[in-house]
Amino acid sequence: MARTFVDQNFLTWEAYVSGGQPNSPEAARIFFLCLDARTTPARFVEHESRSVAAAERDLLKVTDEDLRGMLARSVQTA
């Protein structure tokens, strides 16, 4: 499941949940991919629950403004 939204610079982003095992360093991350500038590195935030299922439920509920806030706090993938 993925969501798309537009940032303050009018770039379109896709947000989706991915993660490894619960309580692992990679558990429950929300990733952001810029659809308008494919060379822009992917970014992510960790979901506080560390649960992929909970992160997916939350991704359905949050507003586009919330997604812009998460994008602003996100870190670039390695």
Image (cartoon, grey):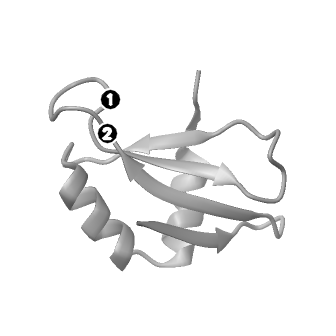
Judge whether 71 appears above or below 9 on screen: above
Secondary structure at numbered mark 1: loop
Residue bearing the label numbered 1: 26
Q: Residue at x 32, y 29 (%)?
A: 26
Report the residue at 39% width, 52% height from top. 17
Mark 1 or mark 2, which is nearer the start of the sequence? 2
Q: Tag 1: Cα neighbours inside 10 Å, few (<14), some, or many (≥20)?
A: few
Name the residue type under label 2. Gly
Give x and y (percent) for residue 12. Answer: 74, 66
Q: Is residue 68 left or right of residue 36?
A: left
- Which quadrant: the C terminus? top right
Quadrant in which the N terminus appears = bottom left
Q: Which residue is mark 2?
A: 19
Tag count in the figure?
A: 2
Which residue ends up furthest to the front in the rendered image? 1
x and y percent of residue 19 in the render? Answer: 31, 39
